[in-house]
Image (cartoon, grey):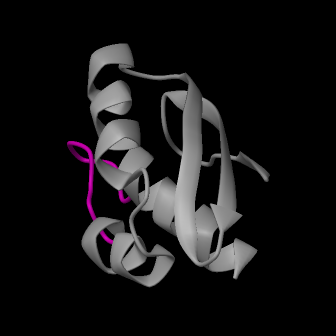
Amino acid sequence: MVYKTHGTCSKEITFDLTGGKVRNVTFTGGCNGNLKGICSLVDGMDVKTAIEKLEGIQCGTKHTSCPDQLAQALKQAI
């Protein structure tokens, strides 16, 4: 799936859902090292667990973040 982000430095998130698990997450733009870490941490994670852990995280004074946008994308996908 491809998800266009809103309110973050990253512009797009791509990922696969396989058997209820998050796979192959990549971000376009954003903080490269941090986003690689997020992608590695959620790989193979249950989609509902990933949403619970990431949803609502804010970046500075923004009302969202790249992890929160991933949670929104996952919610849309399921």
Residue 47 spot, x, y in % from top left: 49, 75
Residue 31 spot, x, y in % from top left: 36, 20
Tell me the residue at 37%/54% (across/down): 42
Residue 69 spot, x, y in % from top left: 51, 56
Query: To which quarter of the image does residue 29 belong?
Result: top right
Which residue lies most toward the left here?
60
Residue 65 in sight in this render: no
Tell me the residue at 48%/66% (across/down): 71
In which quadrant will I find the C terminus?
bottom right
Tell me the residue at 53%/45% (across/down): 7
Residue 25 in sight in this render: yes
Count of numbered badges drawn on the protein: 0
Magenta span of residues: 56-65
The answer to which of 31 and 45 lies nearer the viewer is 45
Residue 44 spot, x, y in % from top left: 43, 58
Whether residue 58 is situated above or below residue 74 in the rendered picture: above
Whether residue 33 is situated above or below residue 78 in the rendered picture: above
Is residue 60 part of the magenta span, yes or no? yes
Tell me the residue at 42%/50% (across/down): 43
Whether residue 13 is situated above or below residue 78 in the rendered picture: above
